[in-house]
Image (spheres, rainbow, N blue to C red):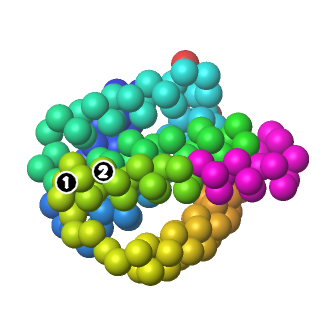
Amino acid sequence: MAAVLSALGVAFLYIGSIFDFLDLTAAAASSLIIVLAVMEGGGGIPWMIYAATSFLSALILPNKYPVLLYIFFAGLYPMVKSAAERLPRIVSAAVKLVFFNVMFTLIMLMGRYLLHLPEDEIGLDAVIYILGNLMLVAYDYLLTQLITLYQRKLRKMLKLGGIFG
């Protein structure tokens, strides 16, 4: 099942690679696969899916920007979220924000210097970071809502419990 989910993650990222305007959406959709693996498999399974999806996507996708988003944020975030939410609420929020800002900086630097994306003005960078942090809060909230929906209703309906073993 991990191989199938990895292939699905690559397919989502491929769509984002072909249609530039879907790069963030594709990375977010691929991260939902990791969320499912964290909830249903746990342990090393999410890491295995993350590694396979990252490697295959980096190898075969024509546009690498969605791959960068996945490798440095979207693919890791569900596992960071799971670990952080075991901590007190304020510490959890701080861990998520620090993780996001470190990874966002790496993504921006790699985008500029490896993929040669246009460099923005310093003032615009500050706006991008502020908007990015606001989007993280919204993404985290929506991800929590999707997880709650899955646990309360969809898990029974879809009968996905135990899909990894």
Q: Residue at x 55, y 56 (%)?
A: 101
* Residue 52 can be seen in this image: yes
Which residue: 16% across, 46% down? Answer: 61
Pick the quarter of the image with the C terminus: top right
Q: Which residue is mark 2?
A: 110
Residue 34 versus residue 18 in the image, above or below? above
Q: Magenta residues: mostly which secondary structure?
A: helix
At mark 2, the secondary structure is: helix
- Mark 1 residue element: loop
Type of amino acid under label 1: Leu
What span is colored magenta in the figure? 85-99
Q: Which mark is residue 115?
A: 1
Residue occupying image coordinates x 12% and y 50%: 62
- Do tag 1 and tag 2 residues touch (Cβ < 8 Å)? yes
Q: Position of residue 105 (x, y in %)?
A: 45, 55
For residue 156, say whether it is visible.
no
| Residue 53 screen position, x and y as percent | 33, 35
Please, is residue 42 above or below residue 78 in the view?
A: above
Question: Compared with residue 153, is residue 46 higher up or lower down, i.e. above or below?
Answer: above
Q: Is residue 92 magenta?
A: yes
